[in-house]
Image: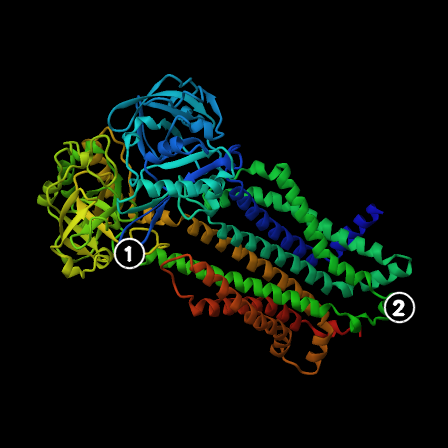
């Protein structure tokens, strides 16, 4: 019996090659797109699922504010004091680990690299996480300063096939040697903690902090029981309330489940996360594509029912049962789906590198052949095969043989209304995806081209250390000799992302009142180099820089060990400083920009001075957040060198910068990027989603067009005798084309009425996530409507013209 069904299925596919080809192509494209999206979604959902202790790991976030301040500030970094104190005070905590991920220069013999995936962690790191240590001891590998563990690929990069354990690497610009104490397997692609080198946290000066407010590391706690996620936070809040009593500071450390950070956290961790909302969007796109592919199959199958009516009638007369016919037609659908699945696996293998580039992921091809994914493919094939074949099978198996063999079936068929509903559904989905894609791209374009208050084009950012500070005057003189270089500045953070937090207080505020602000140490060239607009007062000067230098500030430009961010070592009171505020800070203190000039101000209670200037508000954080108060102040230290260039002779200018850099600081590799690249890095998830939406929206439209083409072809074929009669009676070609296209255009117009409100509501919800966003443009609806109508007109029109151009003598010969 199965052999007979298979023979009949193959025979029908050969008899109707156009319909079979369209069905097969549509299902293959739909399944391929669905599988590619499923690969990405499964990868994102599997983040950190290899961590055996994951359900008990918590990341400590930070919330703080000051009496009389402007709200509570939140973030995912804490001071180094949190881990040691919480471990000592709360018995619910089994262990704690601190981590931070600065860039580091690593040197081994003649090999020299800026390592962007360098991580410092406490010796308890391997007690928390399930990374495989191939060589070395898990308990002692990070116990003690100046120890480092390498990943397998990093060990090969530095040492080849030799054994690296026991060898030494020079790390940082201070010529400090670290001993290699272990080699571990490369970090999995679905881990939120990724690194190439893992060094002992005790090597850092931050290990000595004794304050709550600095935030310079990530803190993770290993709880004794997952239930402690509920019972521990109230105890932490009560403890901190006692600790901060009388200090004018409100501070708390909420706990975030480690396994939920990648998809559910509002704060970035060691790598950018992916919002669960975007997972829902992609899952919805995959489902819509699959539905469109199934709709195409159902439409063509029901439209073809007239051709198979006599076959069904004869087979019923010969004794075939309705159930048997139903099973055969569903079997044909499953066969086509199975063939499409095999073709789609080949397509996925060939297009996976493209998806990896678009998504910035390393989705392994081996996943395609893993039991869970194979099971997913089989489930999709079964579901699609049954759903796509069930209705056509139901319709075909219910034919009455007497009516069919008399030719009365054409008058009684009710499949046309179903085809119209499915076609409307396809158009609604297509228009919805088009509008959504247009709005997303418009928002991303708005983000990338919005006036930020500073110039991010033609500004080169280079990492620098204290060695370069001692050569800075020479470096500036050498670089400014080139007419392509406009200005240079050294600073702690670039204007793209300023995250350091401070507190300020005016003389009209009590000592308990403070205003939480972001802050950035700068030099006099920072404002001219970045293009930030000064709207009141004056810029800082070199004299201001000298006045701001505290007594214990070393000649190398680095604070002595033991400092906390935003404080001066030993609470040294510096000479009077000059500050620059942004408009938001001046407004929060109750001043206009002009009124702020000359006002007395205290920075972190240890530095006092006067407001010298006010700059226009600029976006120093992602556009997901509003602009909050900011203070800029003079200081000699810095981690970044900004170089503003003309951009006229870009390759030659970069080569010039590299040559001067190597001459001034040969011990530091030349690394650079432009500020606009750093800015785009703030929107990794959005840009990634935009690219994927572009691709799969195009796939959805192509599938809808494919189904429309097949249905239009079949519709024209069914009406070929009607067209011949109309032409004999004098109907022009244009009238025939209008007759065939009018029905489809009415379906499109009805679809627009459903799709437009749906797309507007969904995109409004998505835009709510941005503090700065576009209004949904009216043209996105008009453009989507015109595009779908044009595609429909062209697709149907081609078939209509072909049918109208046939010789009526040939088409009516049978009559």
Position in image of residue 710 (x %, y %): 65, 62
Position in image of residue 684 (x %, y %): 41, 48
Quadrant of the drawing holding the C terminus = bottom right
The answer, for residue 423, to whether it is visible in the render is yes
Q: Front-most of 297 and 213?
A: 213
Q: Is residue 421 above or below residue 217?
A: below
Q: Front-most of 70 and 11?
A: 70
Position in image of residue 114 (x %, y %): 32, 32
The answer, for residue 160, to whether it is visible in the render is no
Residue 402, which numbered label?
Answer: 2
Is 770 situated left or right of 326 in this image? left
Report the residue at 73% width, 58% height from top. Answer: 16
Query: Of helix, strand and loop, which one carries label 2?
Result: helix
Q: Front-most of 91 and 4?
A: 91
> Label 1, on which residue?
452
Position in image of residue 7 (x %, y %): 80, 49
Is 269 situated left or right of 36 in this image? left
Q: Is residue 83 above or below residue 450?
A: above
Mark nearer the N terminus (1 vs 2): 2
């Amino acid at each position: 019996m199965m052999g007979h069904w298979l023979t009949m299925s193959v025979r029908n596919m050969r008899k109707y090659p156009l319909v079979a080809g369209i069905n097969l192509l549509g299902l293959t494209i739909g399944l391929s797109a669905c599988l590619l999206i499923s690969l990405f979604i499964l990868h994102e959902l599997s983040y950190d699922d290899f961590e055996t202790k994951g359900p008990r790991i918590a990341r400590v976030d930070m919330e703080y504010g000051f009496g009389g301040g402007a709200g509570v500030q939140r973030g995912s970094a804490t001071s180094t004091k949190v881990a040691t104190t919480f471990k000592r005070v709360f018995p619910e905590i089994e262990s704690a680990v601190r981590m931070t991920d600065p860039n580091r220069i690593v040197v081994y013999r003649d090999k020299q690299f800026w390592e962007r995936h360098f991580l410092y962690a406490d010796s308890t790191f391997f007690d928390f996480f399930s990374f495989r240590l191939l060589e070395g001891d898990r308990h002692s590998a990070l116990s003690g300063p100046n120890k480092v563990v390498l990943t397998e690929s990093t060990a090969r990069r530095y040492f080849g096939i030799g054994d690296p354990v026991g060898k030494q690497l020079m790390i940082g610009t201070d010529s400090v040697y670290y001993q290699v104490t272990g080699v571990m397997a490369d970090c999995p692609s679905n881990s939120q903690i990724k690194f190439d080198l893992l060094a002992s946290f005790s090597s850092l000066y931050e290990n000595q902090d004794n304050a709550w407010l600095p935030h310079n590391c990530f803190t993770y706690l290993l709880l004794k029981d997952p239930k402690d996620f509920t019972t521990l936070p109230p105890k932490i809040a009560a403890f901190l309330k006692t600790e901060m009593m009388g200090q004018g500071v409100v501070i708390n450390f909420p706990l975030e489940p480690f396994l939920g950070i990648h998809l559910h956290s509002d704060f970035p961790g060691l790598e950018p996360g992916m919002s669960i909302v975007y997972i829902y969007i992609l899952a919805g796109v995959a489902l819509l594509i699959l539905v469109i592919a199934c709709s195409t199959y159902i439409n063509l199958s029901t439209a073809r029912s007239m051709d198979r009516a006599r076959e069904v009638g004869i087979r019923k007369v010969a004794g075939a049962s309705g159930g048997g016919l139903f099973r055969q037609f569903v079997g044909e659908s499953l066969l086509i789906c199975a063939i499409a699945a095999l073709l789609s696996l080949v397509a996925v293998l060939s297009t996976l590198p493209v998806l990896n580039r678009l998504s910035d992921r390393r989705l392994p091809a081996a996943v395609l052949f893993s039991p869970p994914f194979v099971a997913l493919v089989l489930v999709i094939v079964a579901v699609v095969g049954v759903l796509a074949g069930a209705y056509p099978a139901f319709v075909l198996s219910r034919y009455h043989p007497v009516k069919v063999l008399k030719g009365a079936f054409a008058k009684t068929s009710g499949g046309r209304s179903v085809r119209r509903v499915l076609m409307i559904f396809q158009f609604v989905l297509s228009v919805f995806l088009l509008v959504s894609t247009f709005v997303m791209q418009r928002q991303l374009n708005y983000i990338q081209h919005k006036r930020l208050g500073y110039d991010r084009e033609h500004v080169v950012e280079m990492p620098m250390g204290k060695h370069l500070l001692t050569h800075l005057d020479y470096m500036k003189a050498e670089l400014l000799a080139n007419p392509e270089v406009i200005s240079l500045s050294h600073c702690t953070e670039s204007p793209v992302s300023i995250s350091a937090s401070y507190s300020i207080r005016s003389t009209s505020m009590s000592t308990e009142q403070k205003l939480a602000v972001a802050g950035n140490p700068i030099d006099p060239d920072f404002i001219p180099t970045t293009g930030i607009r000064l709207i009141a007062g004056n810029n800082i000067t070199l004299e201001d820089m000298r006045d701001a230098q505290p007594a214990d500030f070393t000649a190398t430009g680095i604070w002595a060990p033991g400092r906390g961010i935003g404080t001066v070592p030993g609470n040294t009171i510096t000479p009077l400083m000059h500050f620059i505020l942004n408009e938001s800070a001046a407004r929060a203190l109750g001043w206009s920009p002009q009124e702020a000039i000359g006002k007395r101000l205290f920075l972190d209670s240890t530095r006092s001075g006067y407001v010298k200037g006010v700059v226009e508000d600029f976006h120093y954080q992602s556009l997901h957040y509003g602009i909050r108060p900011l203070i800029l102040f003079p200081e000699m230290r810095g981690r970044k060198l900004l170089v503003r260039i003309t951009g006229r002779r870009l390759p030659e200018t970069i080569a010039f910068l590299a040559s001067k850099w190597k001459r001034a600081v040969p011990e530091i590799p030349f690394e650079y990027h432009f500020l606009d690249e750093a800015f785009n890095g703030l929107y990794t998830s959005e840009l990634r989603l935009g690219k994927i939406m572009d691709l799969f929206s195009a796939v959805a439209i192509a599938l809808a067009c494919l189904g429309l083409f097949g249905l239009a072809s079949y519709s024209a074929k069914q009406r070929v005798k009607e067209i011949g009669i109309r032409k004999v009676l004098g109907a022009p070609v244009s009238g025939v084309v209008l007759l065939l296209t009018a029905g489809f255009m009415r379906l499109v117009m009805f679809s627009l009425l459903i799709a437009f409100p749906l797309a507007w509501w969904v995109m409004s919800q998505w835009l709510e996530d941005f503090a700065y966003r576009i209004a949904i443009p009216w043209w996105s609806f008009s453009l989507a409507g015109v595009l779908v109508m044009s595609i429909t007109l062209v697709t149907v029109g081609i078939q209509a013209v072909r049918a109208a151009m046939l010789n009526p003598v040939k088409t009516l010969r049978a009559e």
